[in-house]
Amino acid sequence: MIDIVLLGATGYTGRLCASYMAQVLPGNVSWAIAGRNKSKLQVLHRELQLEEPKCTVYALDLASDEAISELVKTSRVVINTIGPYATTCGTAVIRACAENGTDYVDCSGEPAWMRDVIAQYDTTACNSGSRIIMTAGWAAVPADLSVYLAALKLQRQFSLPTREVLVCLEDVRGSFSGGSLNSLCSLELVNIAPFDLSPVPRTEQQVAKNGVLSPPNALDVQIVDELGVLVESTHAQIEKTLVGRSWGLYAGHGSDFPSPEGYGEDFFFSSRMRCSNALSALMFRTSLSLLANAITKIPPIRYLAARMFPPGTGPSEEARRSHYFKYRTLAIADNKGAEPVPKVEVKFAYGGDPTDYL
């Protein structure tokens, strides 16, 4: 039995994971680098100076459900770095893990695929004891964790539920990997409601449409005294859906969670990023919308982007050392109109490239 299998180890993200695991895993933990190309895996094994039997090479046919199942049956945990998850082996790997009680982690950011996987395999995973963690990376963890900590603070210090949380990407210096760009190119833009992944269903009438902070204007530019000039974040959709799922997972639980009611019945969440002024916010918003639509809907542009940034490429180690990101989260208690209204601020910072944060 292998303790941890790293699937997709020769890709850009996979190599980062393999390098890190080679440095930090204790000697009594067995692991394997896995993928479809045995020769590339062997080269990586030599480059990282890995030694058997602690770390082995495992090559398999990723188009074969049977081969994937055999791998999963020999593993305690599978880390899957092969994307796009909806169009590669993502579903097959999760199905095998759910059926065999194997734990699973990935760094996806595909909410429509996640919704389908949860609907199909959540019950199976619960019955087998498999723990499935999707989107364990920059696209979700800073926001999801900050919201949890803020709601917990409001509950424990003020005994109040949470009315609104605004997560703001305050500053970032970084790049992206070719694999992430190719994932974007291969997927259609979809609209997912904030609570679509929540295990506790919410009707349209039950969902709070606004928070208590000043809302964005008609151009989607928002000004908040504590945070500055804001525009919707590039991670807004995935962050909203994952925070919405956490809202449902924590609802109705006991003292180990923010409150018996979870985050709060009228909880409202938004994901923003800070700009220097209103004009730059508007320009960023317009440029991002045009770029996303061009890449996903215009084949020649999609082809050119994929050629310029092929899978397996990304920022160099030297460049990553100067990269970072910083989040500030503002949470406001649901005080039912009473004054003063308690507020909590959470700061989340990472010294390194966003692609490193896995």
Image: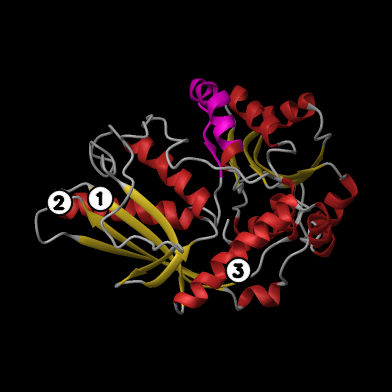
Which one is earlier in the sequence, the residue at label 3 or at label 2?
A: 2
Q: What is the distance, in whole Å, between disc 3 and disc 1 at their CAs?
A: 32 Å
The span picked out in magenta is 113-134
Residue for badge 3 = 353
Where's residue 300, x and y in %? Answer: 84, 56
Residue for badge 2 = 335
Q: Is residue 53 visible?
A: no
Where's residue 225, x and y in %? Answer: 29, 73
Residue for badge 1 = 163
Residue 334 lies within the magenta run: no
Q: Is residue 243 visible?
A: yes
Residue 120 lies within the magenta run: yes
Q: Is disc 1 in contact with disc 2, using a CB cutoff of under 8 Å?
A: yes
Q: Nearer the viewer, mark 3 or mark 1?
A: 1
Give the numbered dot on residue 95: none
Which one is earlier in the sequence, the residue at label 3 or at label 1?
A: 1
Does dot 2 land on a helix, a strand or a loop? loop
Amino acid type assigned to the residue bearing label 1 in the image = Arg
Task: Identify the residue at the far front of this view.
Answer: 218
Tell which of 299 and 269 is nearer to you.
299
Can you tell which quarter of the image residue 175 is in? bottom right
Count of labels shown? 3
